[in-house]
Amino acid sequence: MTRRKNPGCPGRIPMPPCSPQLSPGQRVAWHRLRRGLSQEVLAGLVGRTADWLGKVENDRAPLDRLSVIRSLADALDVPVSALVGEHPNQGHHENQHAHVANIRSTLMDYRQLMPGFPFAVNKEGQPDLRFLRNQVETVMNAYQASDYDRVLRRLPDLLSQAQTAVRAYEGGQRRRAGALLAVACQACAMILTKVGEPDLAWIATDRGMKAAFDCDDLALQGSLMRSGVHSLHSRGQHETAVALTGEAASYLRRQQGGRLSTARLLSVYGTLLLPGAVAAARNGDRASAAEYLDEAERIASQLGRDANHLWTAFGPTNVALHRVTVAASLGDPLAALELGVGVNTVALPRERRVRHLFDMAGAFADVNEIPSAVEHMLEAERLAASQVHQHVMSHQIVGRMMRTKSGRRDRRLADLAQRVGIF
């Protein structure tokens, strides 16, 4: 007895078209035969030859150009996902959206805005402050380790517990709880700007700023001001971000009588200037960008080394990396590449190292050196897949490269684009 062959996969047992075992070419064959089309007819509909289509269906020619995949999908009257399969990170992205929704609900908790309101009665008890501090440190360390999934997953409960602690305690314990809430809000603001939620990041910054002022911690105030600068320029409000940088820097100096007295304050002050320099560059203000960078370099020299006080990762190396970012933001990719090649980032947290790789990839893409740009993105993915797959800047760089002629021919880039959800 002769075994009946699968018309889409010659010589194989039939499988449904959604099976992950089928290649894109095999999916094309399955849907073509289901519609009763010959290879000549389908190839003609997409402006190709039957020989080319035969090679695609037998996996002897790659199907890695989005424009071609879309043309085939249109001709076969199926969605693109029917040919390339479900996105491997679909569940991952759904989880991200769910976590962001949970963060939004927590930030919009009316009890945080009106802690003394008659019906805002604390019923949860008093969270253990030592345990809460450990949780805050865990989330901040996870952020710097580029574990975006863990940060997003833990933040809603952390914010809720920190808010409860502020309502539940009095005196010195309340101030300690407020400091923990401020740091939790900063973690929230940082991750939200990275995943493309700058408006929500601004709300988190506002909540954290209030907590920092309530507990009278100058370093935390400056740290939340830096988050405000990030949130503003992530929204495209570059001029406002530059203005906030100047006013915040003046406030910190004034509060210390013109002299920053601790390594913690030096780090916060220095790292506040860095996003201000980037915002100035994006606003076309070269003079302010250079001024902020030079001042940050002076503070880094005064600090004397790369450090991580209050999770700032501030020091000479971070200033050098921001010179790369500023050059790219000013539209000078060659200068960015010259400044960035050879900078040793090994002492910095992983999140900052990956962000530098984004800058270098973007600069290589801007000078149309797509293979080098792809290699930098793949190196970033090897270091921190979570950050590459979720960071809005990563999506922008990959999408920009996919629109170039050489990018459309690069199979490594096509595979990366699918992993980050470009198609």
Image (cartoon, rainbow, N blue to C red):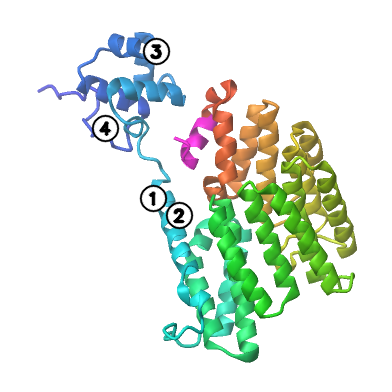
Residue 160 % position (x, y):
48, 74
Q: Which residues are the magenta region?
A: 412-423
Classify residue 61 by image quadrant. top left
First in sequence: mark 3 vs mark 2: 3
| Label 4 SS | loop
Which amino acid, mark 2?
A: Gln
Q: Which residue is mark 4?
A: 17
Q: Which residue is mark 1?
A: 91
Q: CA distance from mark 1 to mark 3?
A: 34 Å
Quadrant of image for the C terminus: top left
The residue depicted at 46 percent of the width and 73 percent of the height is 110
Quadrant of image for the N terminus: top left
Which amino acid, mark 1?
A: Gly
Q: Are marks 1 and 3 in contact (CB under 8 Å)?
A: no
Q: Residue furthest front?
A: 118
| Label 3 SS | helix
The residue depicted at 34 percent of the width and 14 percent of the height is 54
Q: CA distance from mark 2 to mark 1?
A: 9 Å
Which amino acid, mark 4?
A: Pro
Q: Which residue is mark 3?
A: 52
